[in-house]
Image (cartoon, rainbow, N blue to C red):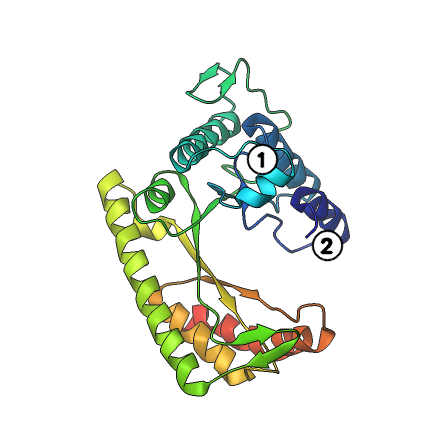
Amino acid sequence: MLEGYSTISYLAALTRRIKLGLLVTCNFFRNPGLLVKIVSTIDVLSGGRAYLGIGAGWFEREAKGLGIAFPSLRERFERLEENLQIAKQMWAGNVKPFEGKHYQLAEPLNNPQPLSKPHPPILIGGEGEKKTLRLVAKYADACNFVMRPTFEYVDGRAFESREKSLDILRKSLDVLRRKLAILRQHCSDVGRPYDDIEKTVVAYILVPDAMDTAEVIGICRQLADLGFQHVIFAMPNVHEIKPLEIIGNEVIPTVAEFKKED
């Protein structure tokens, strides 16, 4: 895939309304101070449309393949929390030295500051119940979960068993419901309003090959009922124009009404 920040910088110049961010940045691929500068720069140049999507990182093969050290799981989460602390400090305009276990910044300058106020939204991706969701409650403006695909897609062909798909969907919704309950408890533990956090979810869809418009809208309705405000479609056939036209013309206008109804 394309390098993310180069790509959204390019998209910032070509677009006027879309939000610009990664789902999600591997936190140890870039120095935290530089990462904050990158997101701040894109926010300024795009007129305030950037967000910071970030996670602990998981893809060992990619890291080692690019010559980047792959820390232990514990260290990855320690680095993620320090990264979040650095972002908060720099976006607050605080230039005092940051002395962490893994990162030391002598003077974390960040000029110009982002246009987004109080700063570009921070989205933390991941579903870990003890560490990730605790960090969401403590630092994030948004969280992101992932639903299992309800279809199989092999060599450009879709395979779907209706009964199996419904079972997968039911189980996925149960998992998401439990994760949200755990996030709510973490918010209570840290004294943070649960409703302050935007709930986002990745849903795998395949129209028109394996799913029709009504099925996609139905999934969105069920996700909205759980409290999700933002559904991000992952589409294996995204390179084809027809599925995008279906989503734009038939799905988005309908699901956009959900918020008004609620």
Name the quarter where the C terminus is drawn: bottom left
Please give left or right for residue 212 compared with residue 248 in the image. Answer: left
Residue 177 lies, in percent from the top left, at: 30, 64
User: Image height check: is 174 above or below 88?
Assistant: below
Identify the mark at residue 72; answer none if there is no mark: none
Query: Hey, which quadrant is residue 115 in on the image?
Result: top right
Say which residue label 1 marks: 29
Disc 2 residue type (three-letter): Thr
Residue 34 lies, in percent from the top left, at: 61, 28
User: Image height check: is 118 above or below 212?
Assistant: above
Q: Nearer the viewer, mark 2 or mark 1?
A: 1
Query: Hey, which quadrant is residue 80 in on the image?
Result: top left
Please give left or right for residue 257 compared with residue 155 in the image. Answer: left
Say which residue label 2 marks: 15
Q: Nearer the viewer, residue 199 or 254?
A: 199
Disc 1 residue type (three-letter): Phe
User: Image height check: is 24 above or below 37?
Assistant: below
Query: Hey, which quadrant is residue 131 in on the image?
Result: top left
Q: CA distance from mark 2 to mark 1?
A: 27 Å
**Residue 98 seen by the camera:** yes
Q: Earlier in the sequence, mark 2 or mark 1?
A: 2
Q: Residue at x 37, y 49 (%)?
A: 196
- Secondary structure category for the residue under label 1: loop
Residue 43 lies, in percent from the top left, at: 63, 40
Residue 21 lies, in percent from the top left, at: 60, 48
Please give left or right for residue 202 compared with residue 244 in the image. Answer: left
- Dot 2 and dot 1 residues touching (CB under 8 Å): no
How packed mark 1 is, by other alpha carbons closer than 10 Å (few <14, some 14-19, many 20 or more), is some
- Secondary structure category for the residue under label 2: loop
Q: Nearer the viewer, residue 143 or 158?
A: 158
